[in-house]
Image: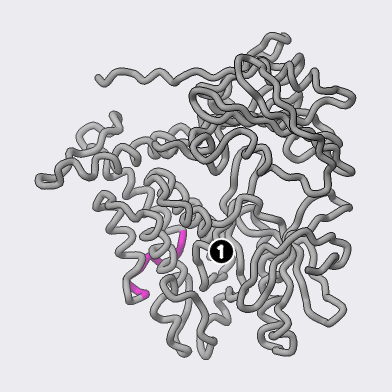
Amino acid sequence: MPGRIGAYRVERLLGVGSFATVWLAYDPALEVRVAIKVLAENWHHDVRVRERFLDEARLLRRMEDDRLVRVRLVGELADGRPYTVLDWADGGSLRERLAAGPLPVATALDLLAEIAAGVAVLHRHRVVHRDLTPGNILFRSTADGERVVIADLGLAKALAVASGLTMRAGTPGYMAPEQDDPLAVVDERADVYALGRLGRQLLAHPVPQPVAAVLRRATATRPDDRYPDAEAFRTALLAAARQTRDPTNPSTGQWPAPAPGTHGADAPVAAALTRWLRAVALTVILVAAAGTVSADSATPSGTARSGPLSVVLPAGWRAAGTGWAGRYDPSGRLEPAMVISPEPRRWAVDPRVPGAFLGLSEAAARRGDPATFVAEQPHADCTPTPPRRVRLGGLDWVVARFDCPYGRPVLVEAAARAPTGLLYAQVVPPPGAGDEFVDTLLDGVRTRRPVIAPPR
């Protein structure tokens, strides 16, 4: 493993592909982690591959969109191999999430629509990706949750040069039939085919007929039979989900009864899609109202709440957030979480701002105990203190402190098992604050079992 690449300190290997190796590195100037993609040694002297490698950086730099991986810098190693410095997608890939098990239908539909929105950015710039796979769909944490980003444009081409004698490119299983023909025209419809294949993998369960029809059209053998581009596919997908509601009473959000002979097999799918559609309809309201978090931050005794999770706010602190990005309950909804801070929107990006992230996860509780969860939150360049165990708020917490040479000077990781799941807290105390501040904060954390309304 190289110790440094340019000005960046290499931390670990992220992945190895056919043409490049990707490393996780630290940028000491900006105090952030980045991904560095380096051309593989065996392709060093191939002019075509080298140019394709640099084309990816040029395309990404030209488009510069939040739905695409961003390029920070292009450089060259001492041996002449080029490398690109990219924003690190800290949430991993869709391939990793699918390997952990099938996603709830509501989540899968939401993700597919977001992926299509990212591909639509390429198409608006007259660029075709040509290699959309679960490994090239990444997730990046943001101050407001999580963003789906499209990566690996190494095979992408501007549409002006995407036809005629182009080399075979793509991944079997997601590659459109015409990509096997070196003389074929390869345009946006090849990406639509890949979106349809991704949809079939994401929506492995039976889905209502309108949604299934969208996926069939997207994966048609003939390009002319598919949607013309990613935006048209996304529009059709969202419309198909809406059509599955009861046409006699759209405001109820109910789904048609199962067809005779299905014995209600599609009922869980329909219910999940209903929840998803309601979430889409409420998006504007949730953003305007700072999500499901409610707080009275005017006094030291103000309390913030996210679903069954609540916390007494320190004086002058407020709350923001709607859920734990990337963690879903069995119904497909984000598990409860919030950020509390004097400036919640700046906490994730400004190391000078104190604050805390609080989350409650049923899934994490099933996988391990609090001590294991805390141990899985390493900070490689920080000095840890031995974890301590303390009982606060009626819960047994495992608390570990890290003193760091850059960025946030102190980070505290804490976890406890609650009746409703595993409680997790990452705390950045105010300057000069010690264990007492952290303990007071954790002592004010509470959970309650959700109240389930009786069926009407």
Q: Residue at x 40, y 39 (%)?
A: 276
Is the residue marked by circle 1 packed among few (<14), some (14-19), or many (20+) residues within 10 Å?
some
Q: Which residue is mark 1?
A: 136
Q: Residue at x 81, y 22 (%)?
A: 435
Q: Which residues are magenta?
A: 223-230
Mark 1: which amino acid? Asn
Quarter of the image with the C terminus is top left
- Residue 332 pos. (x, y %): 42, 39
Viewer-closest of 40 and 398 = 398
Secondary element under disc 1, as helix, strand or loop, is helix
Residue positioned most to the left: 260
Q: How many marks?
A: 1
The quadrant where residue 337 appears: top right
Q: Is residue 187 left or right of residue 52?
A: left
Viewer-closest of 153 and 36 = 36
Q: Residue at x 69, y 25 (%)?
A: 340
The answer to whether residue 338 is above or below residue 194 is above
Quarter of the image with the N terminus is bottom right
- Residue 241 pos. (x, y %): 33, 46
